Amino acid sequence: MSNNHQDRFAALNRLIGGQVSSDRFNRYMLSTDGSIYQVEPAAVVYPKSTDDVLRVVEFAKANGFSIHPRGAGSGLCGSALGKGIVLDFTRFMNRLISVDFEEKYFECEPGYRFGELEAVLKGKRLFFPPDPSSGEYATFGGMYGTNASGAHSVKYGNVADYIMDADVVFGTGKLLRLSDVLSKESASLPNFLKKLYSLYKANEEKIETAYPDIRYNSTGYNLRELARDDRLDLRKLLAGSEGTLGIVTRLKFRLFDKPPYDSLVVAFFEDMRRSARAVQNILPLGPSGIEIMDKSLLTFAGQSSQKLGEKIPAGIDNVLLIEFDSFKPDDCRQQAEKTRQLLVAEQFAREAYVAVSEEEKVKYWALRKAAVPTLYKLKGRKRILALIEDAAVPTDQLVEYVEGIYKILQHHAVDFVLYGHIAKGLLHTRPLLDLKEPRDVALLKTLADEVFELVYSLGGAISGEHGDGRIRSVYIRRQYPDIFDLFLETKQLLDPDNFFNPEIITAHDPDQLKSNLRYGPQYHRIDIAERRLEWPEGFENEVEKCHGCSQCTTVTVATRMCPIYKFTRDEAATPKAKANLLRALISGRVDDKDLLERDFQHVINQCVNCGSCYRECPSNVNIPKMAVEARARFIAKYGPTVESRLLTHVELAGRTTRKFSRGIKLFLKSKAARQMMEKMTGISARREFIEFQSKSLFERISAREGSDRTRVLYFAGCYAGYIRPEIGESAIKVLGQLGMSVLTPDQHCCGLPMLSKGMVDQARGKINKNINKWGALIDSVEHIVVTCSSCGLSLMQEWSYLLDNEMIRRIRQKVIHISRLVAARSERLSLKTAGMAVAYHYPCHLKIQPDPE
């Protein structure tokens, strides 16, 4: 970027209360979303207020930059990307402004997330009906911009059906509240809105008859019912406009009473055609949702839950989840049973049953919501692509649509998976393609063209709920030949300088669908030399596993994910940011030496190696390990800091300073002493000094405790070894009560602190010392017991990052946390709780280990 641009963005940064980032690393982090595209912006702005947005709009107009509003970045069509200024609302403008439980509405900023609202509404008997599968992390600004819906939209509709009001900044630079617009007669409107009103009235008949006769359609602009009774209603026009007509800074939505009862019919089919015919017969019964999942997802269902797997018959092609909800329990049961009988009597389904337990219903719906992320785990070079996944057809054309889809994809010998909202004629069809192959890149346009012609011939719409974006905008003119010019005029009136997402909806570039691909013929990989860790499947392959779905930006407790991001809302903290930068490295977009820059390392160091993202990530991308690799290369070049050396040598400090640790603590009670230490070491003066016990665990116990035949090795770790030896003593007593003989050989730090800081040579040294001290005991013990979950993580997983041999694998197989042994053998313990409620916090690091038999 030129110095002139840098100076301009620096000036903008001084004008707003938020933050402007124009450095290459921040720009690259926001160059992707959940789509197949990658576009590097000129800058990223994180506004704090509507005033900030107004100033950014003024700046962009004056300096010739486009603006691209962005929420969670979970969109599948590439509409949150652009070469200008990406306006990201998730960092600061993410508040719930108000919620009124009596009047049933809420107001929020565009960066507020659906998952956060669900947490607020829990127990209130209210809900926001549109429920996209990405809802836990999707923002309301993004949901409104794409007019999102979800599994229950057949009954409850789309986001546009719930919008009450919004504050919008238009391309004219004017801020308007939509309710104020609606309250005024057309003659009192601002001039550009008067013209829009006149445009609609002059073309009303043509507009109202130009759209296909389907309920679910997010293709192009929704100009229908734009003006009534001399009033202009912009709410549904802006829904689904993907930030091309205005930038929303405040939203108000209505809430609904939540039906307390529901029922779920699970029906298995031998082919899609029978499923489609079944849906046509079920719709008159008024289901709240009907979802379809094909055999690919059913396979994952069986793998994820043994109970579900046992209920899936062999040789099944797909399953329908048919839900009814009601305020009366009998209504749900009756409709569910009527549906089951219909499916059996008409011989649509091979098997059908009513899911009884709440647990079973939750698991099936959880599987459906995780459909796309689950499919990201498919092995091989081919990936599922969001290409033809959003078309909607009239439900009486479902059979023809299914047959057409199969014919097109089979003709081109393309494997695919299919799932989605079949009750509203919308099937998410995902072809498996390798976009590094020119043949598959060429197929993008071929498949999209043929599917569009099929959809159009059946009276459908090419976009049903995800928006148009870069992937479908080219088809809008063909979808609406009679009113596309009105779309252009609408865009010109509301955004006269064409700088709000100019490549979306009204753009008509035939090559856009296959331009700016994240992976494409131009993509190439550069093997990174001098890897510091073991990568059996390849470091580059691990980096490319990240699809950018944005699930790692979840901020609620629904998933553990990244605790740093939940607290800071800083994009640099997201796991996907690390994957983006490392992909830039392996693809040559940044030089190898850039890995050693401190700005790069700042992003990498946002990872604290808790491992939550690795276990929660739908693609199981090992971001923590990738971060360690990046840190290790930095350390190899520059060496560890004083702070890193101090924080990672707990064992050395415990061994050498424990006799006078209390004196050190007294000395560091002085504020001046702590401030001096902060300047010398980089460790905060506010950090509490950790005092070591004068007598370590290893001085308090025998190397062997107990005489039972079942022998276990106890790995105490530094905390129970030197800081809280009483934990180790208690653990040994508990293990004895469980009927075990406890061996506690001489041992060293597990190496995790060093590994987390990138000090891989030091960590490898600790591993070898431990194996040399107690490795010979491995075959003679039943378990290696840990009381520290971090030590357990190190032995079970991270030792293999540094050493890949049979000894490491044997150790991994035997490591177990003491809590699992207690849970498995609790009948041997005499527990007296004295009427207390006992709770246990499940550590993140234990999620990698199954429970013992």
Image (cartoon, rainbow, N blue to C red):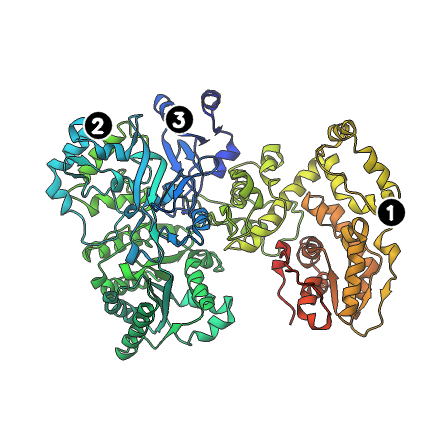
Reading the chain from its start, which is encountered first: label 1 or label 3? 3
835 displayed left or right of 41: right
Q: Mark 3 points at which residue?
A: 51
Rendered location of residue 138, percent (x, y): 42, 46
Q: Quadrant of residue 338?
A: bottom left
Which mark lies nearer to you, 1 or 2? 1
CA gap between label 1 and label 2 equals 78 Å
Mark 3 secondary-structure assignment: helix
Q: Mark 1 touching mark 2, by CB under 8 A?
A: no
CA gap between label 1 and label 3 equals 59 Å
User: In the rendered structure, which amino acid carries the disc numbered 1?
Assistant: Ser
Q: Name the residue under label 1.
A: 694
Q: Which mark is residue 121?
A: none
Reading the chain from its start, which is encountered first: label 1 or label 2? 2
Q: Which of 386 and 690 is in front in this view?
A: 690
Q: Which mark is residue 192?
A: 2
Q: Mark 3 touching mark 2, by CB under 8 A?
A: no
